[in-house]
Amino acid sequence: MTFIQVEFLVLLAVVYALYWGVGGRRFQNAVLLVSSAVFYGWVHPWFLLLLYGSSVLDYFMGRLIVERPESRRAWLTLSMIGNLGMLGYFKYFDFFVENVAAALRSLGVETGLGALGVFLPVGISFYTFQTMSYTLDVYRGKLEPRRDFLDYVVFVSFFPQLVAGPVERATNLLPQVEEDRRFSWTDQREGVALAVWGAFKKVCVADVVAPYVDRVFVLSEPSWLLIALATVGFAIQILADFSGYTDIARGVARMLGFRLTLNFDHPYLATDPSDFWRRWHISFSTWIRDYIYIPLGGSKGGFWGTVAATWGAMVTSGLWHGASWNFVLWGAYHAALITGYRLVKPMIPEGVRGAAWAGPASVVLMFFWTCVGWLIFRETHLARLGLYLTLVPWESTPDQTVAAVVLATTLAVVATPLVVALLLERWVRPRVEGSPWYLPAQTAWWAVAAVAVLSFMRSANNDFIYFAF
């Protein structure tokens, strides 16, 4: 089940009525447990076996780490083997087999090995990372293991953020599960605002630009201009799609009395590669930082130690996104960007760094490098990627030029709501919030956005991009 379908609205209405109508924390958590099972198992009920299997494993490993500390490393190892083994089989087994077979074939050895067609369960990368962080935090002494299994499973399976995050830490979400929650009109208003805006970004921006982007990337002989515009289009699409999901998740959670982690902070306003990762998929990038980058030495190992930790963290980040070499290359590309910036930054004169134009120029330059990364991310065939990177900018047929003009116009139109929203957030909202007409204006916006979503919604909506990860 996805957020952008009628079934979810029906489920949410039933959950909302029971959740706030009857009250009581234990009953509310029971409602969340059942509704999360319905949400996640709606199409493939067997997904629940993996979800609850991971939950049970880390629940008991967390307790054993504290109750039998003489074997605490063994319990942690069992947790990692169980979670990474499950993730490795469903996400990477076919990739591994295909690459081993290809390597042996290049040596003249025919093995008959072939992919099994293992089906990737939706959200497995998210909830395995979430349960592993629980066990790791218990192991590090940052968190007490929970004895109440209901509360713990609600933390793991909480349906608003289950499938595509944010990747919540137990230190943030578990206390909210364990505390009494009170109905608040402020939470309802903020939750609806987030959810409506998220749905608008998904349906009226991401899903509108997606067909144009897809059409360009299947052309046998595209022009450089078309690929460049389609890459910018994909940058718009993936931001609107993923941040749209996050906003719906945070909005629905807020309506139920929870505050989920902020996952996006205007990533295309980043001024350097590290700043981008402080703004993009924040819950995941901080997970990579805390559980991979820092354990590898982080910034404490000197320049080359930091470089090694950066590359280890970023390549892992790329591989997490999918079993394909382009994702590994994407992670390596961002590692190279971060490393390169660390080398170049000390060489930039203070006068340049302090100039009035330096900030905007840095944003534009970083957006360019980000788009190059999105091209690597979007194209799964390395041969095609090589073709795109060797195209000549000034070569284009008249038909390609006309198509490029149409695409550029489309991108300008779909990007306009995002730009207007940024301007309203930065300069208008702080000045009018709290005024008598702020709430009526907000309600009118909800109505306009809802009508737009219903108008643009197709009978067969595109899945959220990060469902594939």
Image (cartoon, rainbow, N blue to C red):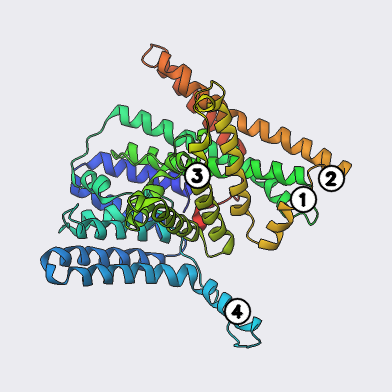
Dot 2 corresponds to which residue?
Answer: 395
CB within 8 Å, label 2 to label 1: yes
Dot 4 corresponds to which residue?
Answer: 103
* Mark 4, secondary structure of its residue: helix
Name the residue located 65 percent from the left edge and 41 percent from the top edge.
233
Dot 1 corresponds to which residue?
Answer: 391
Camera-near label (3 vs 4) is 3
Name the residue located 55 percent from the left edge and 32 percent from the top edge.
362
Alpha carbons under labels 3 and 1: distance apart: 29 Å
Decide which of tag 4 and tag 1 comes sooner along the chain: 4
Dot 3 corresponds to which residue?
Answer: 343
Amino acid carrying label 4: it is Ala
Alpha carbons under labels 4 and 1: distance apart: 30 Å
Alpha carbons under labels 2 and 1: distance apart: 8 Å
Q: Residues within 10 Å of mark 2 (few under 14, many from 20)?
A: few
Name the residue located 61 percent from the left edge and 28 percent from the top edge.
416
Amino acid carrying label 1: it is Leu
Is residue 372 shown left or right of residue 356?
A: right
Nearer to me, 27 or 343: 343
